[in-house]
Amino acid sequence: MTQAIMHAGNCDLCIVLGSSLVVYPAASVPVHAVRNGARLMIINRDETPLDFQADLVVHESVSQTLKEMLRLQDLTG
C-alpha cells in the first residue's frame, strides 16, 4: 500500500479497473492520485463513489471494454 500511494502521488493518470472502490485502504489510492493532480479513469460495471471525480467513467465489463480498446488500436495502427 505504501508503494501504491507513492506511485499514485506521482502519476498523471490513474486507471481503476473493475473495482467498487469501497474497500479501504485500496480505495484511497485513486483519491490520492486525484488530489495530486492526476486524471482518473474508472471502468466498472456499476457506479462507484468516485465516479463524480473521474474524467472518464465506463459502466461496462472490463474485459469487453479492454478488448474493444485493443480492437480500435489495431484499426488505427
Image: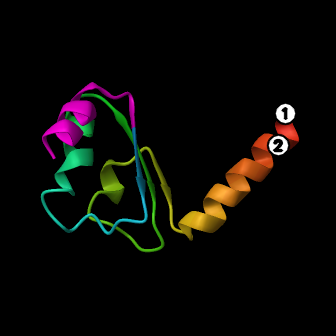
The way the protein has been coloured in the rendering is rainbow
Secondary structure under badge 2? helix
Residue assigned mark 1: 77
Task: Identify the residue shown where x is 13% and y is 40%.
Answer: 2
Picture quadrant where residue 48 is located: bottom left
Residue 36, image x, y percentages: 22, 29
Note whether 53 is above or below 9 in the view shown.
below
**Percent from the top left, x then y, of residue 10?**
27, 25
Task: Tell me where the magenta segment starts and ends, as one range.
Answer: 1-13
Q: Where is residue 44? Give x, y as percent.
A: 45, 66
Would you place residue 70 above or below residue 58 in this image?
above
User: Is 3 within the magenta?
Assistant: yes
* Apparent side of residue 76 relative to residue 59 in the rendered image (left or right): right
Q: Secondary structure at mark 1?
A: loop
Query: Is most of the magenta stretch helix, strand or loop?
Result: helix
Q: Report if the CB atoms under discs 2 and 1 are less than 8 Å apart.
A: yes
Q: Nearer the viewer, residue 65 or 1?
A: 1
What residue would you read off at disc 2?
Answer: 74
Three-letter code for the amino acid on which mark 2 is drawn: Asp
Callout 2: 10 Å neighbours few (<14), some, many (20+)? few
Which residue appears at 69% of the width and 59% of the height? 67
Left or right, residue 55 beside residue 31: right
Q: Is residue 8 magenta?
A: yes
